[in-house]
Amino acid sequence: MGSRWTYRYSDFYGKSETYTVTVTASSAAGITDEIRAGKIRHAASFEEGLALVHRKLGSLQLREVSPYLPIFGLKETPAWKEVEVFEGKEPFKARLAGAESVRVPAGTFEAQKVVVEGNEYGRNWTQLVRPYTITAWYAPAARRVIKMTFVGAPVGYFQAEQETIELMETSFPIKAAGADATAAATRPPTTMASLAPTAVAGAGSLPQIGDAWTYRYTDKAYGRSETYTVQVTSAVADEISDEARIGKAKHAAMFENELMLIQRKIGKLPIREFSPYLLSRGPVQEKPEWRQFELFPGRGANFRASPVGTESVTVPAGTFEAHKLVILGDIRLTAAKLTAWYAPAVKRLVKMEIDVQSSTLVGRENEVLELMEYRLQ
């Protein structure tokens, strides 16, 4: 796979955790990576500009400010005066604060310091306000942020906040501060191509980087409809990564060799997709682990997936001979069903339906995904 970094997270209250970041795709448009702590993971994409990205690893809430900033160009722009830190509140202002020698577990680096400052306001824009500062250090030799802090003073019901992220190690050689680090800082920035993962040759049924599909999402229970596009960013033997987009809103995800319902949020639109690249793993044949698994996170491993043969299915993109998979179970004793159709010619899901009956414990759910068009390399 691609370049890899391991970080340590710690906060004011003694909580500490390590996690690893791995690049899964890179292009002129941006960089996609995935963070992992044990079996828990979170994928995200980064483009040119300064932005705060929220990342969730189980119970651990992480934030990163443009970790690959030097690759896109470490220079102030007008957009640096309008950085959204707290949603719906007044923007923060960022500035370059010069070079600084920084020591982290991975070593000592000559780094460029970026400071993002503003105010955190109380609930409902009350008069309660406190200054809040995010500081990030970027070292060219490390190719990614090496340290980041989030600091807020205790004011009123605001508790003291001090979170720190520090680089512990990398998968590639890095040099300490001094002559070598200074030379590294004067070299051209790392190109995105050098961060790209290695594809597996002869993958056969695997989709290719750049393959794209457009879907129509319909929420029949509430009358909502929207279209979105998915494009593959990485495809290797055991993992496929893609990015879903609606306009400028996007969501990156990774799919492995197991049944899973991925919940995606593209802007304000929540989308769910069930193992969209299932055919890339071979024929749709029932396996022992399909007889009892968790479909909806936190709602119990009480679902069963059953292949029911092939079926001709018509969607806006055309009519396809597709493999049909039916998943049955219940949510709080309420019947739930998911049906998915996969067409070899498309290399991805062509249609999916989620149907949950209404009850006193569970609300009605009736969602449909349909393939509108697709483009394969």
Image (cartoon, rainbow, N blue to C red):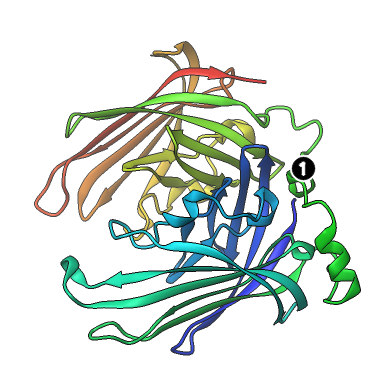
- Foreground residue among 293 and 160: 160
Locate residue 4, reporting x and y percent: 72, 60
Q: What residue occupies the far right of the structure in this picture? A: 179
Q: Dot 1, how many residues are within 10 Å of its Cα: few (below 14), some (14-19), or many (20+)?
A: few
The answer to whether 301 appears left or right of 342 in the picture is left
The answer to whether 304 appears left or right of 106 in the picture is left
Which quadrant of the rendered structure holds the C terminus?
A: top right
At label 1, the amino acid type is Ala
Q: Place residue 210 in its image quadrant.
A: top right
Q: What residue occupies the far top of the structure in this picture? A: 319
Q: Place residue 161 in its image quadrant.
A: bottom left
- Foreground residue among 48 and 251: 48
The answer to whether 47 appears left or right of 83 in the picture is right
Q: Helix, strand, or loop for circle 1?
A: helix
Locate residue 54, reporting x and y percent: 45, 60
Q: Is residue 260 above or below residue 74?
A: above
Q: Is residue 199 above or below residue 353?
A: below
- Foreground residue among 59 and 111: 111
Residue occupying the point 19% across, 70% down: 123
Q: What residue occupies the far bottom of the structure in this picture? A: 14
Circle 1 residue: 193
Residue occupying the point 54% across, 64% down: 95
Q: Place residue 105 in its image quadrant.
A: bottom right
